[in-house]
Image (cartoon, helix red, strand yellow):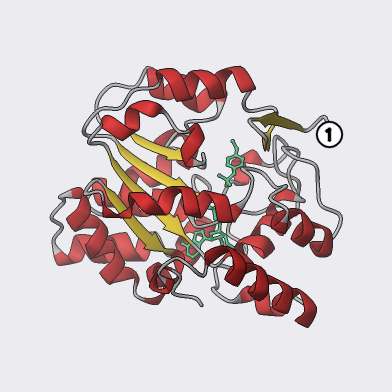
């Protein structure tokens, strides 16, 4: 373990922003309101895209909120010290982000009616996205090469642990009526239909022009230019000069980085670990 990371129940987390004691408190003591909306992801699955979409839905397409408040304050990060404090004191319905695996998630959720959207993404693209992101932050030990990060990822030795365990942990929740599972790939393929699905899940009725504003203002290009959404405010604090959240935004970018041997090794591992799950849950396969 390096000085940049903290380990809790065998999983490592970015240091600086949380502690084992608060992770324990979050699991045992955090409570939900029925009107809360949760965005749950393995890091680099499209968390901040979903934050933008939901903020716009809740604002009926009005861009004032997304243009004036940083995304981490609009949807505080449950397992960060500042996000946790913010959430505990927040009045009214809350938008909450988390990357926690199911076994570390607040116990109260499993008896609550709070709604959760879980985003899944091709893990190969998560590897590439994570490599470029984490190597430009001071939150974890920086990978020296994609090859090294690939190895760490398949061993589950990356922030928030094994992607396979994360997915296997959360997918059994898919039949609950307060849980919606969406893939990054379907969001990308037909954003408007995916936004309609999210509106229906949240019980929000939008006019066609409001829906168009949600789709347009949560697009990669618009988010990349919005300083409240693109993490540029974190430069010098947690992100280096080359660091960026909105890097490429393209499904399948892994093909530009994986070697043939890595692609084959990953296919084999995916088969070994996920073959027993319904394959339609993985629309990139
Ligand atoms: N509006 C948008 N459209 C498409 N991809 C988006 C997006 N907003 C963020 N992303 C992508 O989501 C990934 C970050 O995920 P997270 O928010 O969970 O950290 C990045 O992937 P890439 O690094 O592949 O570009 C980022 O570009
Ligand atoms: C508080 C800054 C910060 C750092 C890293 C993050 O990771 S992720 O984009 O959610 O995966 C988020 C916020």
Residue underneath mark 1: 2
Q: Is mark 1 within 8 Å of ligand 2?
A: no
Residue 26 in percent (x, y) is at 47, 23
In-front residue for pair 236/49 = 49
- Residue 140 relative to residue 109: left or right: right
Q: Which of the 4 image quarters holds residue 137?
A: top right
Instruction: Give the total number of marks visible in the rendering.
Output: 1
Residue 123: x percent and y percent?
Answer: 59, 64
Q: Is residue 187 visible in this depiction of the protein?
A: yes
Instruction: Give left or right: position of 252 versus 176.
Output: right
- For this view, does 112 lie left or right of residue 15? left
Residue 250 lies, in percent from the top left, at 55, 73
The quadrant of the rendered image in which ligand 1 is seen is bottom right
Q: Residue furthest right?
A: 144
Please, is residue 221 above or below residue 22 in the view?
Answer: below
Residue 158 picture location, percent across and down: 70, 47
How many C-alpha atoms fall within 10 Å of the one at disc 1: few (<14), some, or many (≥20)?
few
Q: Name the residue furthest bottom.
A: 260
Q: Residue at x 73, y 47 (%)?
A: 157
At 68% across and 53% down in the image, what residue appears? Answer: 133
Specify the quadrant that holds the N terminus: top right
Pick the front one: 154 or 276? 276
* Occupied quadrant, residue 253: bottom right
The residue tagged with tag 1: helix, strand or loop?
loop
Query: Residue at position x 13%, y 55% from top?
Result: 205
Give above or below for 217 relative to 160.
below
Give whichever of 247, 115 is nearer the camera: 115
Q: Residue at x 21, y 32 (%)?
A: 34
Figure quadrant of residue 270: bottom right
Q: Would you say residue 94 is visible in this rendering? A: no
Q: Is residue 145 above or below residue 59?
A: below
């Amino acid at each position: 373990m390096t000085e940049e990371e903290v380990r809790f129940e065998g999983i490592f987390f970015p240091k600086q922003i949380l502690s084992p004691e608060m992770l324990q408190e979050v699991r045992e003591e955090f409570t939900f309101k029925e009107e809360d909306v949760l965005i749950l992801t393995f890091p680099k699955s499209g968390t901040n895209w979903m934050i933008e979409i939901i903020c716009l839905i809740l604002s009926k397409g009005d861009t004032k909120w997304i243009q004036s408040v940083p995304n981490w304050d609009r949807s505080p990060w449950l397992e960060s010290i500042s996000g946790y404090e913010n959430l505990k004191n927040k009045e009214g319905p809350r938008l909450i982000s988390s990357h926690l695996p199911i076994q570390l998630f607040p116990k109260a959720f499993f008896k609550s009616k709070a709604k959760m959207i879980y985003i899944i993404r091709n893990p190969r693209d998560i590897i590439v996205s994570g490599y470029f992101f984490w190597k430009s932050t001071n939150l974890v030990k920086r990978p020296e090469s994609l090859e090294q990060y690939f190895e760490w990822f398949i061993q589950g030795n990356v922030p928030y642990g094994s992607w396979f365990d994360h997915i296997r942990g959360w997918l059994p929740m898919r039949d609950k009526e307060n849980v919606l599972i969406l893939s990054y790939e379907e969001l990308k393929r037909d954003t408007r239909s995916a936004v309609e699905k999210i509106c229906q899940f949240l019980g929000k009725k939008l006019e066609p022009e409001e829906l168009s504003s949600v789709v347009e203002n949560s697009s990669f290009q618009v988010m990349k230019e919005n300083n409240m959404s693109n993490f540029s405010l974190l430069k010098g604090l947690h992100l280096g000069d080359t660091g960026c959240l909105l890097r490429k935004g393209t499904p399948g970018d892994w093909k530009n980085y994986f070697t043939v041997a890595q692609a084959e090794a990953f296919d084999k591992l995916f088969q070994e670990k996920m073959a027993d799950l319904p394959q339609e849950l993985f629309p990139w396969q």
